Image: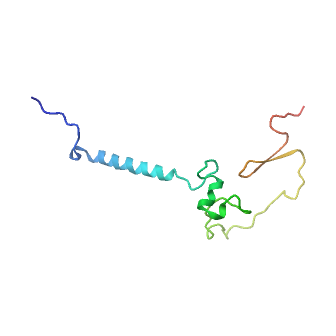
Amino acid sequence: AGRPHRLIQSTSDTTPDQTTMVWTAAFLMIFVLCAGSEDYCYDEPHCDPYAWGDSFPLCHPLLEHHHSPINLDQHMIRNDSLGPLQLEGFDEIQTGHWTLENDGHSGDSCAGLLLGYFAV
């Protein structure tokens, strides 16, 4: 007796704003999925240092000299307009207690007492 309900909306009923929103959402979803992928990492088994050698043979951690797989453009790593580094204080003897800790990626040092200890 009345008009039947439509379950599917035809594309001719959508506005240009709706179409733009759908395409924008699809683009952003693809962008996020692509941007989230990493070629290497430090903590996940599929991309940790032991997996680097699968994609970057010179970066395998079991080699004598291994490196992180970072692409350094040889033409851009040096700026000839900059002068040489002026290193100061490296020839001075440091006093006090020092702690050097290997955190797996680089070194970390601090002067003074170990964390949790206090001078009395």
Relative side of 89 to 32, left or right: right
- Above or below, 59 relative to 14: below
| Residue situated in front as seen by the camera: 112 or 38 | 38
Q: Residue at x 73, y 52 (%)?
A: 106
Q: Tally the numbered discs.
A: 0
Q: Position of residue 98 (x, y in %)?
A: 85, 46
Q: Position of residue 78 (x, y in %)?
A: 66, 68
Q: Residue at x 85, y 33 (%)?
A: 118
Q: In the current view of this chain or complex, which residue is farthest to the left?
A: 1
Q: How is the image coloured?
A: rainbow
Q: Residue at x 47, y 50 (%)?
A: 33
| Image quarter of the N terminus | top left
Q: Position of residue 94 (x, y in %)?
A: 88, 51
Relative side of 44 to 82, left or right: left
- Above or below, 84 relative to 115: below
Q: Quadrant of residue 8?
A: top left
| Image quarter of the C terminus | top right
Q: Residue at x 63, y 60 (%)?
A: 53
Relative side of 15 to 53, left or right: left
Relative side of 8 to 29, left or right: left
- Above or below, 70 relative to 42: below
Q: Position of residue 115 (x, y in %)?
A: 80, 37
